[in-house]
Image (cartoon, grey):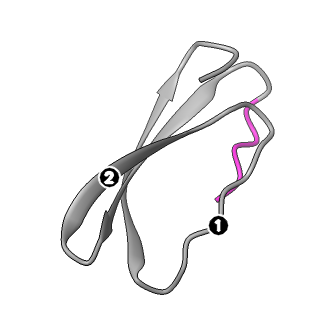
Amino acid sequence: MYNTRNDDRAWLRYTDNGQTNYTCLNPNSRDYFDGQEVLTGIKIESASHC
């Protein structure tokens, strides 16, 4: 995943082996999911960092 927003953070909701987890991406940053993680939601917030 890559957050292309310049001034907004992005919260990612995902499942990993059936368990729901959350991670935050700072503006213009990326995160990698492996084959078992499935993205289930994205929330954009107007904050410049997590």
Horizontal side, residue 37 vs residue 27: left or right: left
Q: Quadrant of residue 31?
A: bottom right
Horizontal side, residue 8 vs residue 11: left or right: right
- Which residue is located at x 49 percent, y 86 percent? 35
Residue indicated by mark 1 = 32
Q: Amino acid at mark 1?
A: Tyr
Horizontal side, residue 20 vs residue 36: left or right: left
Residue indicated by mark 2 = 21
The image position of residue 5, as x and y in percent, is 73, 32
- Which residue is located at x 64 percent, y 66 percent? 32
Q: Residues within 10 Å of mark 2 (few under 14, many from 20)?
A: few
Under tag 2, what secondary structure?
strand
Q: CA distance from mark 2 to mark 1?
A: 14 Å
Q: Which residues are magenta?
A: 1-5
- Above or below: residue 45 compared with residue 15: above
Dot placed on the residue nearer the N-terminal end, 2 or 1:
2
Q: Quadrant of residue 34?
A: bottom right
